[in-house]
Amino acid sequence: MRPIHGDDPHALAIVRLGVDVPYEQAWALQRWVHGKRVAGEVTDTVLFLEHAPVYTAGKRTAAHERPADGTPVVDVDRGGRLTWHGPGQLVAYPIVGITDVVAYACRLEDTMIQVCADFGVTARRVPGRGGVWAAGDASLGLPDRQLGAVGIRVARGVTMHGFALNCANDPRWFSRIAPCGLPGVGVSSLSAETGRRIVVEEVMPIAEKRLAEALGLEPYELHEEDLLRR
């Protein structure tokens, strides 16, 4: 059921922004929604999308982690380090009120772990590393492989940024960087792990459901134009 009041504590608005979304455009929308959520004018909201190809650097990114070939990088206000977003990768930006940052980050990881399981892929946390991973096999020379990453910002008790889950993206985009500042690790996707093409459009409704469950909220669909009327 669609909530009547903007501050309904049990509702999660699901907003699909589409594909090839420029990073700066989505970032500006996040900031706008964040302000509305802080003011209690909108419910908890999550933006789902696929970005146009972009490298982004969180606050912990070191100079040596940037691409050596001069590839442009967008510096952002989230935690974490350098990563890539683009076609074939599902990105979710929850803008929600929280009280415990660590527990919230774990809920985002739990969401991705559950989504991976829904597609027959075993994902896990790795101590000392953020995100979720497919386990490697040292005897075969196979490294752990990152399937999804988390990077967040919390201001005035409301989150921004979120998680990115690799579905059918080209792993070569990660070859210019050490993903999340972790050299010597692999990057994979749901498609690579299962041997069949699993596109974002297929994953998105499952991710919406699992995220709402992890946050204990009731999801409802909201079109972008309706959001902007708030």
Image: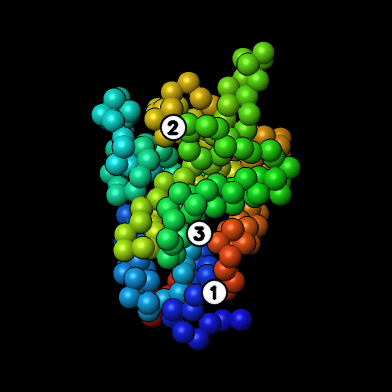
Is residue 27 shown left or right of residue 1? left
Quadrant of the frame with the C terminus:
bottom left
* The furthest residue to the front: 100
Q: Name the residue under label 1.
A: 10
Is residue 44 shown left or right of residue 41? right
In this rendering, the label closer to the viewer, 1 or 2? 1
Q: Nearer the viewer, residue 23 or 108?
A: 108
Q: Name the residue under label 3.
A: 48
Dot 2 falls on a residue whose secondary structure is helix
Q: Which of the marked residues, 1 or 2, is nearer the chain's N terminus?
A: 1
Residue 24, compared with residue 137, is above or below; it is below
Picture coordinates of residue 104, whole percent (x, y): 48, 54
Q: Name the residue under label 2.
A: 179
Identify the residue at image location x=46%, y=60%: 94
Q: Which of the marked residues, 1 or 3, is nearer the chain's N terminus?
A: 1
User: Marks 2 and 1: in contact by CB < 8 Å?
Assistant: no
Is residue 14 shown left or right of residue 119? left
Q: Which of 44 and 203 is in front in this view?
A: 44
